[in-house]
Image (spheres, grey):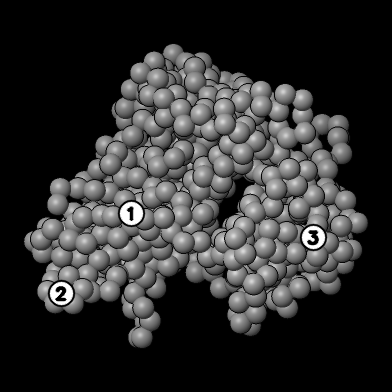
């Protein structure tokens, strides 16, 4: 895994200064070992592309581009040696590009922290990120943790020449609504064909794909597509033997004729590295997710297997629109859903920060008025997929060779060409599964684990069920580092103290507050330091 940063400047001297700054980035702000290497430079010295991380050295004959192919050098202009740097995002934006405009130059990168370091903005924090992390739990729109560093919008191409950027709409990989490529149409058959096409290249790997299989809707879709495409598969399920996910996943694997194994989760009584988890989450997820999320640690061992999962399946069902569709007063229901999602913890924010954050939501209020269900569908694509999933994917790719077929642009565009009502009803997902493997439609979806007396080990999750020692640690950590890092410039301290007082009633908020304290104080730079383990119970 490697990261990419490109610089385009008005002068060779400005480009050299920013390139030099990028090359000496503090390794503590990047989650894989460096150092940075200059992979390409324009003939006139006004543009450069750098790589950081394992695999950063250029392979002979391969084109210079970012890991996801989102950033690359453009074709040099005839005469003078000028050449642009170019970046592109897809409709889902799950492989993000971050842009920083500085005096006389533009920086493009697939890591927000590296862009912020190079632009000298690592300690200039954007309150909109903190507001979003405490409310929906992920960044919205273009916000990042750093002022002046923004996420490129979906379906966008930016070309930067001599420090001047121009943006255009990216042509989609396919245009199903207008006919598009053969086979990729707005129908279940079109979505199934797009999904098979997305996974077919995995046949060339020669080894089985390791699939995370649950008892739900989406991972079985991916499993069926892999088998249909002739890709060898090994399925894995995380849980105890009697959990519904494990039971149903085993039946799905049996029908598909693929190997299935079960991995047993942790049980009550374990000891965990809480501070290490918080620091690592900020570092590997670019400061954009809460430490409640399971995103891993920096410097993981090199993963040899290709892994896959059902991430993104909600896009086939209309995203957040699924919850409001088919109800009476669907428009009112949609407005209430979006309000709860985006402002559920508005009372934690200081008045000025809250006002700025609410103002940033105005475009979505207008979209709700024009079409409530479409607005929820689009909000999911732009923000839940384009920001939450993008940040999580960046973290996952550090530790594994991950493919997410349901985020493939061909699949998403084919699905969005299907009427929204068909998607929100669940009909599209069922029909796609029937196209891929009809017998799987007869296997029920996993429900909740049966209730038990005492501690239910089958559903035990220490992030939600920790005891007093961890509760006290999280309170003290968030209050102490929050004060030193400026958290209470955005968050109302009295409200935070109430939320952090054990026993914790809203543990998601506690994790978010601790994560923000870590981010704003810079404590994430210690993510590689050893730490004392704390008892869960």
> Which residue extends farthest front?
178
Q: Position of residue 387 (x, y in %)?
A: 49, 45
- Quarter of the figure that contains the N terminus: bottom left
Q: Nearer the viewer, mark 1 or mark 2?
A: 1
Residue wearing tag 3: 433
Residue shown at 44%/24% (left/top)? 358
Q: Position of residue 254 (x, y in %)?
A: 86, 67
C-alpha distance separating marks 3 and 1:
38 Å
In this rendered view, identify the residue nearer to me: 100 or 509.
100
Check disc 2 and report its element: helix, strand or loop: loop
Residue 65 against residue 204 in the figure, above or below: above
Residue wearing tag 1: 167
In the drawing, does residue 18 fall left or right of residue 34?
Answer: left
In this rendered view, identify the residue nearer to me: 133 or 531.
133
In this rendered view, identify the residue nearer to me: 332 or 28.
332
**Quarter of the rendering containing residue 190:** bottom right
In this rendered view, identify the residue nearer to me: 494 or 402.
402
Residue 102 against residue 73 in the figure, above or below: above
**Quarter of the rendering containing residue 161:** bottom left
What number is the disc on residue 139? none
Q: Earlier in the sequence, mark 1 or mark 2?
A: 2
Badge 3 vs badge 2, beta-carbon distance below 8 Å: no
Q: Position of residue 46 (x, y in %)?
A: 15, 65
C-alpha distance separating marks 3 and 2:
53 Å
Please rate how many residues cluster around mark 1, counting C-alpha atoms within 10 Å: few if below 14, some from 14 to 19, many from 20: some
Residue wearing tag 2: 81
Residue shown at 86%/35% (left/top)? 452
Residue 163 against residue 128 in the figure, above or below: below
Instruction: Report whether residue 98 is seen.
Output: yes
Q: Nearer the viewer, mark 3 or mark 2?
A: 2
Q: Position of residue 167 (x, y in %)?
A: 33, 54
């Amino acid at each position: 895994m490697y990261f990419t940063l490109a610089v385009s400047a008005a002068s060779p001297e400005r480009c050299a200064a920013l390139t030099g700054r990028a090359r000496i980035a503090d390794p503590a702000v990047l989650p894989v070992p460096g150092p940075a290497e200059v992979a390409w430079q324009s003939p006139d010295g006004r543009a450069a592309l750098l790589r950081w991380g394992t695999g950063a050295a250029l392979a002979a004959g391969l084109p210079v581009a970012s890991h996801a192919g989102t950033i690359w050098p453009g074709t040099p202009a005839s005469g003078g040696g000028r050449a642009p740097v170019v970046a592109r995002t897809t409709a889902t934006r799950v492989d993000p590009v971050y842009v920083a405009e500085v005096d006389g130059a533009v920086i493009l990168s697939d890591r927000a922290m590296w862009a912020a370091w190079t632009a000298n903005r690592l300690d200039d924090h954007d309150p909109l990120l903190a507001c979003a992390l405490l409310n929906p739990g992920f960044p919205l729109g273009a916000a990042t943790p750093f002022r002046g560093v923004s996420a490129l919008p979906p379906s966008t191409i930016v070309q930067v020449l001599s420090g001047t950027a121009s943006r255009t709409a990216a042509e989609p990989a396919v245009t199903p609504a207008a006919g598009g490529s053969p086979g990729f149409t707005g129908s279940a058959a079109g979505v199934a064909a797009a999904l098979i096409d997305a996974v077919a290249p995995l046949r060339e790997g020669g080894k089985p794909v390791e699939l995370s299989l649950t008892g739900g809707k989406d991972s079985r879709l991916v499993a069926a597509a892999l088998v249909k495409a002739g890709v060898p598969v090994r399925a894995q399920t995380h849980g105890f033997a009697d959990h519904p996910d494990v039971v149903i996943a085993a039946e799905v694997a049996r029908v598909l004729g693929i190997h299935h194994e079960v991995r047993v989760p942790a049980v009550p009584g374990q000891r965990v590295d809480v501070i290490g988890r918080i620091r690592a989450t900020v570092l590997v997820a670019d400061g954009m997710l809460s430490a409640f999320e399971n995103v891993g640690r920096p410097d993981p061992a090199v993963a040899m297997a290709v892994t896959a999962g059902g991430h993104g399946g909600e896009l086939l069902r209309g995203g957040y629109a699924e919850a409001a569709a088919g109800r009476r007063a669907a428009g009112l229901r949609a407005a209430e859903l979006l309000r709860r999602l985006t402002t559920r913890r508005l009372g934690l924010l200081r008045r000025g920060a809250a006002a700025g954050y609410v103002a940033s939501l105005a475009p979505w209020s207008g979209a709700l008025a024009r079409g409530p269900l479409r607005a929820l569908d689009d909000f999911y694509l732009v923000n839940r997929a384009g920001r939450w999933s993008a940040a999580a994917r960046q973290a996952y790719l550090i530790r594994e060779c991950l493919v997410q077929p349901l985020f493939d642009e061909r699949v998403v565009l084919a699905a969005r060409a299907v009427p929204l009502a068909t998607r929100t009803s669940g009909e599209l997902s069922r029909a796609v599964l029937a196209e891929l493997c009809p017998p799987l439609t007869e296997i029920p979806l996993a429900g909740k684990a049966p209730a038990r007396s005492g501690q239910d080990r089958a559903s035990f999750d220490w992030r939600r069920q920790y005891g007093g020692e961890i509760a006290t640690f999280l309170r003290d950590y968030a209050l102490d580092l929050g004060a030193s890092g400026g958290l209470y410039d955005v968050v109302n301290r009295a409200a935070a103290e109430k939320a952090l007082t054990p026993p914790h009633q809203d543990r998601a908020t506690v994790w978010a507050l601790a994560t923000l304290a870590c981010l704003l104080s810079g404590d994430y730079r210690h993510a590689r330091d050893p730490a004392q383990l704390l008892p869960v119970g």
